[in-house]
Image: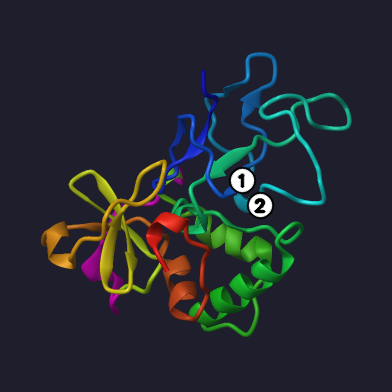
């Protein structure tokens, strides 16, 4: 039975067997006795994206991983970085330092600031994440054309934009590319606008291999 720890672009957490390229967390949101999620879906505003393989460390997924024998943080998994960014997460400054610094530079540029702290990014993102109450935004309200790596929803399907094509998202990867007209005239942005601005400013997220080169 798969654990409920796989994150969708909308930020919901589902129980599926597939794992994906990245892990991450939103603090402690599971019961280590039952390995099930609590009712809350975050215990901190710092929603991060981490490496699955870092310095050979091993964790008991959704078990007891703190030094005191308590839960520690709850491991969540993402198809790729594009998915994690859409859900409102950001790169971790500990295990993904260079990527986190690159994201922070692009994020600051997108906000027309010289620099920005992790706390400032978390605060800005938290009000816009779909999973923490951010409202759906019609793509037309986003202004300039969406950059590669942005995700949106149409007819109940999540799509990622890459090279002028739409990639239908799934837990195991992206389906065959579609033309933009296939989404129809009405669709809503999933990726937080502040992250979209960071993508426009030059941040290049890691894609799942099914997205092509």
Whether residue 121 is situated above or below residue 155 in the rendered picture: below
Quadrant position of residue 171: top left
Whether residue 154 is situated above or below residue 59 in the rendered picture: below
Residue at 76% x, 51% y: name it. Answer: 54
Could you tell whether 113 is left or right of 210 in the image? right
100 and 61: which is toward the camera: 61
Q: Quadrant of the C terminus?
A: bottom left
Q: Position of residue 104 (x, y in %)?
A: 62, 72
Q: Position of residue 150 (x, y in %)?
A: 38, 65
> Badge 1 is on which residue?
23
Residue at 51% x, 18% y: name it. Answer: 1
The figure's colour scheme reads rainbow
Local SS, label 2: strand
Magenta residues, start to end: 132-145
CA distance separating discs 2 and 1: 5 Å
Local SS, label 1: strand
Q: In the rendered structure, are the residues bearing label 2 and label 1 in contact, judged by CB atoms less than 8 Å apart? A: yes
The residue carrying pointer 2 sits among few (fewer than 14), some (14 to 19) or many (20 or more) residues within 10 Å by Cα, namely: many
209 and 154: which is toward the camera: 209
Q: Position of residue 129 (x, y in %)?
A: 45, 52
> Badge 2 is on which residue?
50
Tell which circle, 2 or 1, labels the residue nearer the N-terminal end: 1
Residue at 79% x, 31% y: name it. Answer: 65
């Amino acid at each position: 039975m798969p654990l409920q720890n796989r994150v969708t672009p909308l930020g919901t957490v589902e129980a599926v067997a597939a794992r994906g390229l990245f892990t991450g967390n939103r603090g402690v949101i599971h019961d280590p006795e039952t390995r099930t999620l609590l009712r809350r879906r975050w215990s901190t505003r710092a929603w991060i994206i981490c490496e699955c393989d870092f310095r050979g460390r091993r964790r008991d997924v959704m078990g007891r991983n703190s030094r005191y024998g308590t839960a520690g943080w709850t491991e969540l998994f993402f198809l790729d970085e594009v998915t994690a960014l859409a859900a409102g997460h950001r790169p971790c400054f500990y295990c993904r330092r260079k990527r986190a610094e690159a994201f922070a530079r692009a994020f600051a540029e997108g906000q027309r600031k010289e620099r920005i702290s992790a706390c400032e990014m978390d605060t800005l993102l938290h009000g816009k994440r779909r999973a923490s109450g951010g409202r759906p935004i019609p793509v037309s309200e986003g202004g300039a054309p969406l950059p590669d790596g942005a995700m949106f929803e149409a007819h109940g399907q999540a799509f990622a934009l890459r090279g002028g094509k739409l990639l239908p998202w799934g837990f195991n990867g992206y389906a065959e590319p579609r033309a933009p007209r296939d989404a129809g005239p009405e669709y809503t942005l999933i990726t937080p606008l502040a992250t979209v601005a960071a993508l426009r400013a030059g941040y290049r997220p890691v894609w799942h291999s099914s997205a092509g080169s």
